[in-house]
């Protein structure tokens, strides 16, 4: 018995010895791991100075790092969850895959803080999906930020005492607003409405406004009494009443692409004709047929005319397909040889080489139904690939400036970027003065092309005001279209019907001017409850210009 028991104990000892201890098991790599290798950033900067930064990490986990929302990015941990350096995160980049055991270089442009001093700087890799940090951090570096020397401020342009007064924002007073009608029979989604508006004067003195919601039908709505929108209370605003539904305007022509009324429009009251413009963001080839016209008969049938395109000689044709406005008769007779149709209004469109890096305007003769090409000349544009961008403020950071714009020189000096858009424009000729005004939405904060989408941290609304005389000089060959500087650039805040609004500066996507009433109407997206649009009206002040 003792011998058997001893043998059993010995066997048990052998078995126990053969089983590996947990401490002897080889380490299993975690799904996500990162080892810091090196970082390249400046030691000293000026306040608000953009600078290039690179961060190298080794993927020490078992998972491959990939692009997009389901994988990794680099985030600032000192300071944490803040954009003191222009952005709080750096993305991996489109199309990249970082296999386990290989190094990854995160690269981006950042921006120094606005306040001088000694600023801490440390970053770490994180899961994009849930923000979970993993692996090693960079070294914690202290960067000295010095105060930027005072910059000379440009003198604002002065009114020409011998010329007509140029209308600026101060020449307008807020007259009131109204709500747009429910979609009803017109269908579509008003939240994402982006096509322009036009004004129709009825025989009984009432006004109707042409509108169209996203994927909906064109309709007319009667303009109600204006009520001032104050203290975020939209309850008192009147709602426009839908009157006539035209339908979805589309023009099919043999040998031409089918076009739809998805941009701006203008109503010719004398001819009872609606002129409308069309665009296609990804179009490349020959100039897109950007203008058409429609007339609605008493029986409700619609007759289309056109389409028309600008001449091939106007190479930057995308500059002029955002909308249509009427040029004043006096301006057209003096400068453009009678061409009284204004086409514009510039800004960014995808595949941007054929558009304007800023506001734009062309003058066209009345379209000829028998000719597909307009008799048009350019008055204003900034060729995207010509090195002449329109000016803007510097409240932005290009995380990858090789595409879509340039870094700002300072908080006040920047140039047009791919995140800047022009939603509408009007040419106003009033007793008080005149101006060509475009209504721009300028991107703010971090800007970049991230995984197939253009992104900006915020936005601000601006008026770009141009002196008609400057545009006339272009028509007469005295200067180039890109040599025209805005007479004024003014940041504007429109009335809000949403206390504590979370969306930043919803844009103006349509504009029209009532010359008899002296009222400028602006179609403003997402004003009410951060969702629904609203129409604001601004009245040109009295007939006497400012002294």
Image (cartoon, rainbow, N blue to C red):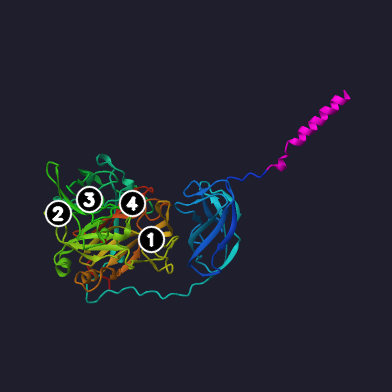
Quarter of the rendering occupied by the C terminus: bottom left
Q: Is residue 259 magenta?
A: no
| Residue highlighted by disc 4 | 525
Q: Is residue 67 left or right of residue 78?
A: left
Q: Tag 4's secondary structure?
A: strand
Tell me the CA gap for discs 2 and 3: 12 Å
Front: mark 2 or 1: 1
Counting from the top left corner in percent of width and height, residue 538 is at 28, 59
Q: Decide which of tag 2 and tag 3 comes sooner along the chain.
A: 3
Q: Is residue 288 left or right of residue 411?
A: left
Q: Decide which of tag 1 and tag 3 comes sooner along the chain.
A: 3
Tell me the CA gap for discs 2 and 4: 27 Å
What residue is at 22 percent from the left and 65 percent from the top? 378
Q: Decide which of tag 1 and tag 4 comes sooner along the chain.
A: 1
Tell me the CA gap for discs 1 and 3: 36 Å
| Residue highlighted by disc 2 | 269
Counting from the top left corner in percent of width and height, residue 79 is at 56, 59
Quarter of the rendering occupied by the N terminus: top right
| Residue highlighted by disc 3 | 209
Q: Residues within 10 Å of mark 3 (few under 14, many from 20)?
A: many
Range of the magenta residues?
1-25
Q: Residues within 10 Å of mark 4 (few under 14, many from 20)?
A: many
């Amino acid at each position: 018995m003792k011998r058997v028991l001893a043998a059993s104990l010995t066997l048990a000892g052998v078995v126990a010895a053969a089983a590996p201890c947990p401490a002897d098991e080889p380490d299993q790599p975690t799904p996500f791991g990162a080892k810091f290798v090196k970082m390249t950033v400046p030691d000293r900067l000026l306040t608000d100075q953009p600078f290039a930064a690179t961060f190298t990490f080794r993927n020490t986990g078992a998972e491959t790092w990939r692009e997009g929302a389901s994988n990794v990015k680099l985030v600032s941990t000192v300071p944490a969850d803040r954009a003191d350096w222009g952005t709080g995160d750096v993305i991996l980049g489109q199309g990249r895959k970082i296999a386990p055991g290989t190094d990854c270089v995160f690269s981006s442009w950042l921006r120094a803080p606005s306040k001088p001093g000694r600023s801490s700087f440390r970053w770490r890799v994180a899961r994009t999906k849930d923000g979970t940090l993993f692996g090693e951090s960079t070294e914690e570096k202290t960067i000295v930020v010095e105060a930027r020397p005072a910059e000379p401020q440009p003198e604002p342009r002065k009114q020409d005492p011998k010329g007509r007064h140029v209308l600026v924002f101060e020449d307008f007073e807020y007259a009131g607003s109204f709500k747009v009608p429910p979609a009803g029979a017109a269908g579509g989604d008003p939240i994402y409405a982006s096509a322009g508006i036009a004004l129709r004067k009825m025989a009984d003195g009432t006004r109707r406004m042409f509108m169209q919601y996203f994927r909906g039908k064109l309709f007319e709505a009667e303009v109600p009494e204006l009520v001032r929108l104050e203290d975020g209370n939209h309850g008192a605003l009147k709602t426009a009443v839908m009157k006539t539904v035209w339908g979805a305007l589309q023009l099919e022509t043999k040998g031409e692409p089918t076009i739809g009324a998805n941009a701006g429009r203008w109503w010719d009251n004398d001819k009872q004709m609606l002129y409308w413009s069309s665009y296609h963001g990804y179009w490349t080839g020959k100039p897109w047929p950007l203008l058409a016209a429609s007339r609605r008969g008493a029986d409700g049938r619609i007759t289309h005319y056109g389409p028309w395109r600008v001449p091939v000689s106007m190479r930057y044709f995308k500059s002029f397909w955002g909308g249509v406005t009427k040029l004043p008769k006096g301006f057209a007779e003096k400068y453009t040889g009678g061409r009284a149709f204004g086409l514009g209004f510039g800004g960014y469109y995808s595949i941007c080489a054929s558009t304007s890096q800023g506001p734009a305007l062309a003058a066209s003769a009345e379209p000829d139904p028998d000719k597909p090409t307009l008799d048009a000349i350019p008055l204003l544009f900034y060729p995207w690939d010509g090195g002449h961008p329109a000016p803007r403020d510097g409240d932005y950071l290009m995380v990858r400036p090789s595409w879509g714009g340039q870094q700002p020189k300072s908080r006040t000096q920047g140039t047009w970027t791919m995140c800047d858009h022009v939603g509408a424009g009007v040419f106003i000729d009033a007793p008080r003065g005149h101006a060509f005004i475009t209504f721009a939405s300028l991107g703010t904060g971090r800007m970049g092309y991230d995984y197939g989408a253009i992104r900006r941290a915020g936005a601000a609304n601006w008026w770009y005001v141009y002196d008609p005389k400057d545009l006339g000089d272009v028509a007469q060959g005295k200067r180039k279209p890109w040599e025209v500087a805005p007479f004024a650039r003014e940041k504007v805040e429109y009335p809000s019907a949403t206390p504590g609004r979370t969306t930043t500066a919803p844009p103006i996507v349509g504009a029209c001017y009532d010359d008899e009433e002296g009222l400028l109407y602006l179609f403003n997206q997402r004003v009410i409850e951060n969702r629904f649009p609203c129409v604001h009206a601004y009245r040109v002040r009295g007939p006497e210009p400012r002294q």
